[in-house]
Amino acid sequence: MDDAIRAFMTFLTVERQASPETIRSYRSDLRQLATFLEQARPSPQAQPMVAIRDVTTDSLRAYLQWLDRKGEKASSLGRKLACLRSFFRFHVREGTVEKNPADGIRSPKLPKTLPQVLTKDDANVLMEFPVGQTPLSLRDRAILETLYSTGARVSEAVALNLGDLNRSDGLVHLRGKGRKERIVPVGDVALQAIHAYRASLTQATADDRPATPLFLNHRGGRLTARSVARLVARYSSRLAGGAVSPHALRHSYATHLLDEGADLRAIQELLGHASLSTTQKYTHLATDQLMAVYDRAHPRARSAKTTPEEKDGPAT
């Protein structure tokens, strides 16, 4: 299995140009499968290693059932199954195996959950939490403002270089999933926060070449997605609703745009969604505007809210 996993990792890295997070996740999933299969062998002495051609649909089902008994969430099981399908699909094309043993397995039914979204007030408060004029405080403020102002995924935000920011036009160049790229607006407040952060850097770290990372860690290198996730969690834990992930800022960005009347197709483009159905989940969240329109426009909504005096006129 080791050689098969290495070949797949090379394919993901070179041909698919998958993100480091995807590669790390797939490698971990496949190594977990290999360990499970090796430990499940009936006679380890007779079979020193598990070969990829010996993996069957039944053995994959046993692996997924083992994960389920361990308490893995349905979303995690679905992701691991998607990894297995891609892995064996690649080796079918390469001729390593004749058929994909993962094709006969149905994905687990996922619960329908709405994305976590901040209120507009909480989003504004969160932006103000980083205080002070130190480079790290200014950086944290700039990161929060950028995530909320652009709707960028955390992986897209940490991949930003100085050359990706067009300050004069108020635009930023994001590199998304599947090598897709898009240019989205970035607000004045976020631009001011970025400018204040970059101006605070010392001459040694304030490299202004286009390929220089926009956001730096304390050692002057590029920030990681995990570092930004910890940063967002630390500040947002002070909100009444508790800590949120960077993706909650992306969800909040889309929902607040929809609340203010933005077109769903425009939001799809801004988020970089391939399918409109992915964007449509935000229609379930934009209830404030919909309820306000209902209360103003529906005759039964108005009559239900009027008092007897308003409906019948003043008592005589």
Image: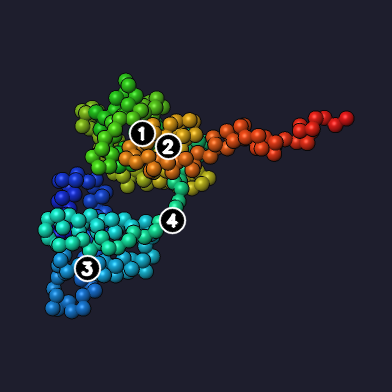
First in sequence: mark 4 or mark 3? 3
Q: Are marks 2 and 1 in contact (CB under 8 Å)?
A: yes
Which residue was labeled with disc 2?
A: 254
Q: Which mark is residue 56?
A: 3
Residue beneath disc 1: 270
Dot 3 or dot 2: first in sequence order is: 3
For the N terminus, the quadrant is: bottom left
> SS at mark 4?
loop
Q: Residues within 10 Å of mark 2 (few under 14, many from 20)?
A: many
Q: Which mark is residue 111?
A: 4
Alpha-carbon distance for marks 4 and 2? 22 Å
Image point 66% across, 37% down: which residue?
A: 300
Look at the picture and state if 118 lies above or below 214: below
Q: Nearer the viewer, mark 3 or mark 2?
A: 3
Disc 3 from disc 2: Cα separation: 43 Å
Q: Residue at x 79, y 32 (%)?
A: 312
Rounded to the nearest angstrom, the CA distance separating label 4 from label 1 is 27 Å
Say which amino acid is labelled 4: Pro
Mark positioned earlier in the residue sequence (2 or 1): 2
User: Marks 3 and 4: in contact by CB < 8 Å?
Assistant: no
Residue 287 left/right relative to 39: right
Residue 127, horizontal then vertical, whole percent:
44, 35
x 25%, y 69%: residue: 59
SS category of the residue bearing label 2? helix
